[in-house]
Amino acid sequence: MYKYIRLTNTLRYSGERINNGIRLCCTHEFNSNKHRSRSHTAGLLFGAAVSSLLAYKIYKENKFVYLKEAEKQINTDKYGAYQPNLPEYSLEEVTKHATKSTKIWVIFRRGVYDITSFVEEHPGGDQIMLGAGNSIEPFWLLYGVHNQIQIYEMLEKMRIGNISEKDAGESVKDMSDPYHNDPKRHPILKPASVKPFNAEAPLSLLADNFISPNELFYVRNHLPVPEVDISTYELEVEVEGTKKKLVLSFKDLERLQKHTITATIMCAGNRRSEMSKLKTVKGLDWGCAAIGNATYTGVRLRDVLDKVGIKEGSDYKHVQFEGLDTDSTGKSYGASIPFWRAVDKKCDVLLAYEMNGKPLPKDHGFPIRVVVPGVVGARNVKWLGKIVVSQNESDSHWQQNDYKGFSPSIDWDNVDFSTAPAIQELPVTSAICKPAPGSTVKIEDGCIFVQEFSRE
Ligand SMILES: Nc1nc2c(c(=O)[nH]1)N[C@H]1C(S)=C(S)[C@@H](COP(=O)(O)O)O[C@H]1N2
Ligand SMILES: [Mo]
């Protein structure tokens, strides 16, 4: 329900839905008896149709933004460069320093660093531990988000020496770019990070379509996009603690009863840039468009579980999903949802192979992704490789040490992830897509026209 929308701190507006948006009228100057309220229908209500001319203009503008982003390369050559005044270590020597008791050393380019104190002060920083006693470069190639001057500066403060010339570059010698399989993207997607690829469409275009076109649908990848051959693709289904097991090919899945749903998927980080205006929030700086609404076709998860002998009412607590995308240690992206949701017919949890009537695009999980209507994006696992019915939640980093909510008094120095439940449902949200924030609008008869989305 909405009654008032606050656009400024001093004026109140009442809104009236007209076919493709809302007419907002200032209730200070105009008859306040005219306030109206109406309930939104469930799902995403994107206002419709704006002239293609405007769309083209925005397209061009954003193409430019995209190009500017791509050019914004930072020069980091001086970090990790050889420093003649510091001692030299062999790789063998560095590998002896991989735990807190021996001190934790890492290599970056020619530099050797003692990061023990950093690891102690940042308990959540376990990704840096992947490189303990060796080079962190293979991991940094994977997590492009680290490519920031502040991080290089911080590392350089922990510098203790140089790696010997003989051993320098050893760990990245045979490493091609792990992102070389990533697909081509529509240039209108504004990347918040390129490797891994994370991008949203301009907010104003989001409001043009109730169903978000595949090309404009936001992309949130934590890792490189895996290359999957549909003819050899296999989905494993396991029931923990039993011998029940099923392996399904893509054709097997296609043979099961086909089901189509319309669902909204939103990233938990959507609108983080607005939150950061109040208090800096760690993570990708998403605008308002890390959300999309699509039709998905595939098979119900409950039908697949039924095939392995698991029915509604069975005594299990969670269903875990593993993606085929892996980090440099071979660990895959993973998440889980409560068992009851996985088997409840009304919850419509789907293993989707089509998005908006087309085969699932590579960025959105080709050939199979989980779609969990009403549940945070992070649990909608893409490139699905394995399903495990279990008494436990997924032990993945993204289920245990990320995607959890804390009170404002908790910060990165005092956060204990084990104290909060993993996010499943997200709160209701709505945002004005047009006019854009900060733009000047024409007031007609005391009213302006806005287009918005809401997600319930
Ligand atoms: N395998 C896998 N599944 C994943 C992710 C991922 O990185 N790997 N990202 C998750 C997150 S955080 C979100 S918000 C959604 C994004 O889905 P989309 O890229 O199709 O919009 O996918 C989820 N599923
Ligand atoms: Mo997300």
Image (spheres, rainbow, N blue to C red):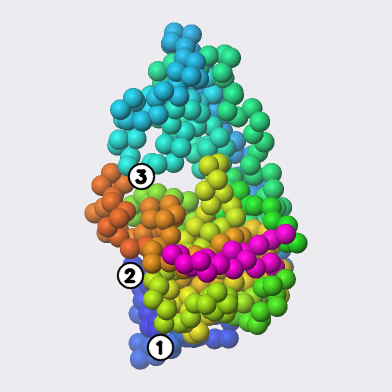
- State how far apart marks 2 and 3 are (Cα): 42 Å
- Relative depth, front residue between 41 and 332: 332
**Sooner in the amino-acid sequence: mark 1 or mark 2:** 2
Given contact means CB atoms under 8 Å apart, are the residues at marks 2 and 3 in contact? no
Return the residue at label 3: 124
Disc 2: which residue: 10
Mark 1 to mark 3 CA distance (whole Å): 45 Å
Q: Residue furthest top?
A: 85
Tell me the mark number nearer the camera, choosing from 1 and 3.
Answer: 3
Q: Residue at x 35, y 87 (%)?
A: 32
The alpha-carbon separation of the residues under discs 1 and 2 comes to: 21 Å
User: Cβ of disc 3 within 8 Å of ligand 1?
Assistant: no
Q: Secondary structure at mark 3?
A: loop
Specify start and end residues of the magenta stretch as a single range: 232-250
**Residue drawn at x 60%, y 29% as measured from the top left:** 172
User: What x and y, as percent, mark residue 145?
Assistant: 51, 43
| Residue 81 in magenta stretch | no
Q: Amino acid at mark 2?
A: Thr
Q: Is residue 119 above or below residue 405?
A: above
The quarter of the rendered structure image containing the C terminus is bottom left
Disc 2 crowd rating (10 Å Cα; few below 14, some 14-19, many 20+) is few
Q: Residue at x 28, y 51 (%)?
A: 416
Tag of residue 37 = 1
Task: Say which of marks 2 and 3 sits in front.
Answer: 3
Q: The N terminus appears in which quarter of the rendering?
A: bottom left
